[in-house]
Amino acid sequence: MNNDGIENGLHERNSGTMSSRKSLSLVASVILSGLVAFGSFGATAAAASRRGSDVRGQTVLTAAAPQLVVAGPARLLHVDVEGKRAVSFYSVDSRTGGPEACRAGSPSAKRSALRTNASNQLDLDVAAGQTVCLVTTEGPVQVAWHAQQAVAGTLGTDTVHASNR
């Protein structure tokens, strides 16, 4: 009988130890999960802070009167063209031209056509010292755009890249 009492006592102690180990393991798991969640939140917040502020605009373009859309560093996300009139965009060096850079640089700038009556997804990186301009050679056309100003050092060094989305 004496052995049975010792075995029962050992079993009770081991059960208590296992329960406390399980509890400790559970607490450690909760703490680790919290740290992982906090770390991913920090990474998301850091990515959002590198993005910069949103810039949205709209205007009516008139024939042969270029309009400045966004000056770098920035990313031009999309340009919406309302109607069937042709609209194109181009990039110019704006370090010395300031607000008049679109008018001064338009004759020599390579133009890219935008789809009419559509939202044109562009994802253009506009480097510091560059400006993206819109122009139409036809009658008035309504355009709207969405860009994000970049925080210094978050864009590549290339001037303008477009995706075909």
Image (cartoon, helix red, strand yellow):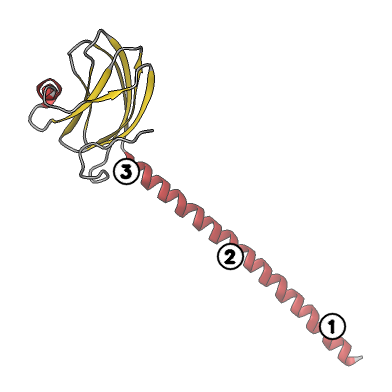
Q: Give the x, y percent position of residue 52.
A: 31, 37
Q: Give the x, y percent position of residue 24.
A: 63, 68
* Earlier-in-chain disc, 3 versus 1: 1
> Relative to residue 24, is residue 11 drawn left or right?
right
Where residue 65 sits, quadrant-wise, is: top left
Residue 120 against residue 158 in the figure, above or below: above
Q: CA distance from mark 2 to mark 1?
A: 30 Å
Q: Secondary structure at mark 1?
A: helix
> Relative to residue 33, is residue 97 drawn left or right?
left
Q: Nearer the viewer, residue 122 or 98?
A: 122
Q: CA distance from mark 3 to mark 1?
A: 63 Å
Q: Give the x, y percent position of residue 16.
A: 74, 74
**Disc 1 marks which amino acid?**
Asn
Task: Residue at 83% x, 86% y: name it.
Answer: 7
Task: Residue at 29% x, 11% y: name it.
Answer: 141
* Earlier-in-chain disc, 2 versus 1: 1
Quarter of the image that includes the N terminus = bottom right
In the picture of the structure, the residue carrying the numbered disc 2 is: 28
- Outermost residue on the right side: it is 1
Disc assigned to residue 8: 1
**Disc 2 marks which amino acid?**
Ala
- Outermost residue on the top side: it is 139
Disc 3 crowd rating (10 Å Cα; few below 14, some 14-19, many 20+) is: some
Disc 2 crowd rating (10 Å Cα; few below 14, some 14-19, many 20+) is: few
Task: Residue at 59% x, 62% y: name it.
Answer: 29
**Disc 3 marks which amino acid?**
Arg
Q: Nearer the viewer, residue 34 or 93?
A: 93
Residue 30 against residue 47 in the figure, above or below: below
Q: Secondary structure at mark 2?
A: helix
In the picture of the structure, the residue carrying the numbered disc 3 is: 50
